[in-house]
Amino acid sequence: MLPVFVVGISITAEQTYDIDEFELSDIGVVVERSNGEEVTIPFTLDLVDEAHRDLLDEVGTHTIRVNYQAFNAEFTLTLTEEAVYEIVFITYDGHPIDPITVIAGEPIPELPVLTAEGHIFKG
């Protein structure tokens, strides 16, 4: 039986992640072996080039270098920070109306329709 050895690595990852939800386990390192087999190993901090480790906690688009044995691979990772706001409407007498969720930079969804007998609400 011939010995099996690593012949290369590649990265499996989506390109963009919300920084608040990003986990190292979202990324896989595919190890290519001399017998044609491919094995995915966990992406851990010790595989990341030391100069790139801090980038995993920063918003922006980064090139990340991964090292495994004598092999390395680079991939582009974009970490975004999505500002989400919940807007709560309170009536004049202190009763809340169903809140709406607004994402910064996106159109505001339809506002709640207010009704009160004998009244017309405009704008």
Image: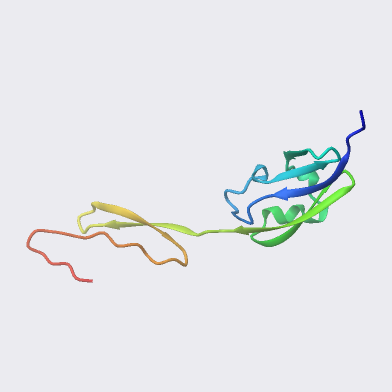
Q: Which quadrant of the figure contains the N terminus?
A: top right
Residue sitting farthest toward the left:
118
Q: Quadrant of residue 119?
A: bottom left
Depicted 35 relative to depicted 63: above or below:
above
Q: Residue furthest right?
A: 2
**Residue 31 spot, x, y in % from top left:** 79, 42
The picture places residue 79, in percent across and down from the top left corner, at 63, 57
Residue 107 image offset from top left, x and y in percent: 40, 67
Residue 86, by quadrant, is bottom left
Residue situated furthest top in the rendering = 1
Q: Quadrant of residue 121?
A: bottom left
Quadrant, the C terminus: bottom left
Residue displayed at 8% across by 59% down: 117
Q: Is residue 74 left or right of residue 116?
A: right
In the rendered structure, the answer to whether residue 18 lies left or right of residue 72 reads left
**Along the line of sight, the residue nearer the viewer: 54 or 73:** 73
Q: How is the image coloured?
A: rainbow
Q: Is residue 116 left or right of residue 96?
A: left
The one of 10 and 38 positioned closer to us in this rendering:
38
101 shown above or below 43: below
Residue at 16% over, 59% down: 115
Residue at x 44%, y 66% (from the top left corner):
106
Position of residue 16 measured from the top left corner of the image (x, y, whole percent): 61, 57
Residue shown at 68% from the left, 46% from the top = 27
